[in-house]
Image: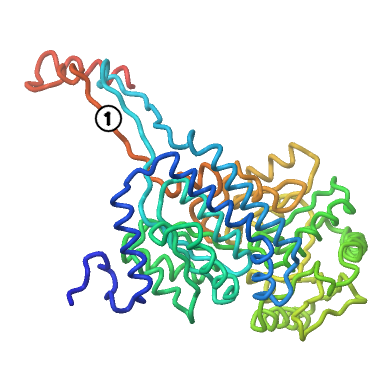
Amino acid sequence: MNQPSMFPAAPAETIPAEFRTAFLAQRAAAARDRQPSLAARRADLHALHRLLAENHDALIDAVNRDYGIRSRFETRMTELLQCQDAAKDAIRRVKRWMRPQRRHLDITQYPLAKAWVFPQPVGVVGIVVPWNFPIAMAFQPLICALAAGNRVMIKMSENSNALALLLKDLIPQYFAADKLALFEDGGGRGPQFTQLPFDHLFFTGSPATGRAVMANCAANLTPVTLELGGKSPCIVAPDYPLREAARRIVWTKLLNAGQVCTSVDYLLLPEGSVDAFVDHARAVAASYYPNLENGDYSAIIDQRQYDRLQLLLEDARARGARLVPLLPDQPGNAARRILSPMLVLDVDDDMLIMRSEIFGPLLPVRTYRNRDEVVAYIGARYSPLAMYLYTRDRALERWYLEHTISGGVTVNDGMLHIGTPALPFGGVGHSGMGHYHGKEGFLTFSKLRPVFRQGPWRALNLLMPPYRGRAEKLLAFLLKRAG
């Protein structure tokens, strides 16, 4: 059989049959319905909302099985609540997002021409989902893609197999396969999935895997959104109360046991404040987690990740760091992969913990003398996915915002910019490219199609050949006006 022209970048036989079948069915369905109606898009979003709302317990249980221990409260708050709110927000706003937008004309196009752009779905979208927030990272981009009128294929992580099998059973009850199809990883099938010639691919994961995904997409000239990670800094300014900062920073760091791409990856404190911060942080951690095994605190996802985090601690200790447990009376449980939270003091940049994203409940602490030192340190590293700043000084806040760059910022709290539907979420440089959430997510999965309609008479008639005489004088006038 000849290779189908739909798969120009890789031999069709290297792509699993179920991927090919689903992709071709969705591509054909997209061609039959090039511009889904507002009613159809709202119906898809309502179906997605029902899927989440009607299957709360089953979804939470599946995530818990994949983790071993995953805080049920955090699954409800950070995944189900966020996604249900985002779906309802899209239902309310998609009509406005779909409207054509008039654009102004220049002087050579007056008086009767018109110009506008209108959003069209790109077609078939692929979504690659990480394991740390597997519901949110599947459904948040899915909401945006369905609002934009697309067909969607989703590939889950190998660490989310219980959830993937559940969703494979649930999704056909709410969506036709040519609208939404979901696949478990099935033993490292990610590269084959990203070889499909999607009209857009959305990937969340590590920078290293993001490079490979981007290379696969380049072979098909597939546009890609990469949501990656990096070392997100948190700066506490001298004016901000340390006790209050500690309460918010400890919550941010220990949410999902630190397995969050926008978690605080290192803390920058003014010189002389470390001991006071340690005391406050220990008191806060004890109040939040009186028992690490009561279900409020999540386990590390698998043994490989648990061992990696232990290696970071061993390397830091060997290189002279001080390891300060936040919960000294609770050492954790290695058999259940419950890693007790730890502050890592006296760090240097040769330590592994300062050279890679941590993705766990370990928090390195550095000190600084002045704001210029902070900006120089952050600026010498890859641009982070998030940055956190604690200050009540608006002038200092503005100075930091103007002298640093990151994917997003929360001032005087942690991660809340991510949970605000009206704000776009995305990285910059090494931490990613592109945005999603809300209107920006709708635009990510749309083609803003420009249209120009000429009127019955056009000003360009005055600039037609032969150019000598009237046309030349008029052009000289327009250039002078433009200058």
Q: Position of residue 261 (x, y in %)?
A: 63, 63
Q: How is the image coloured?
A: rainbow
Image quarter where the N terminus lies is bottom left
Q: Position of residue 128 (x, y in %)?
A: 49, 65
Displayed quadrant of residue 331: bottom right
Count of numbered badges drawn on the protein:
1
Q: Position of residue 428 (x, y in %)?
A: 53, 54
Q: Residue furthest bottom?
A: 335
- Crowd band around label 1 with a 10 angstrom C-alpha radius: few (<14), some (14–19), many (20+): few
Q: Is residue 440 left or right of residue 108?
A: right
Answer above or below: position of 479 versus 225. Answer: above
Answer above or below: position of 404 versus 289. Answer: above
Q: Is residue 400 left or right of residue 180?
A: right
**436 vs 12, nearest the viewer:** 12
Q: Residue furthest front?
A: 173
Residue type highlighted by circle 1: Phe
Image point 74% across, 41% down: which residue?
Answer: 396
Q: Secondary structure at mark 1?
A: strand
Displayed quadrant of residue 72: bottom right
Image point 78% across, 84% down: which residue?
Answer: 334
Residue designated by label 1: 452
Q: Residue furthest left?
A: 466
Image point 44% across, 59% down: which residue?
Answer: 180
Q: Is residue 41 left or right of residue 276?
A: left
Image quarter where the C terminus lies is top left
**188 vs 284, nearest the viewer:** 188
Image point 81% across, 41% down: which residue?
Answer: 392
Answer above or below: position of 158 versus 384. Answer: below
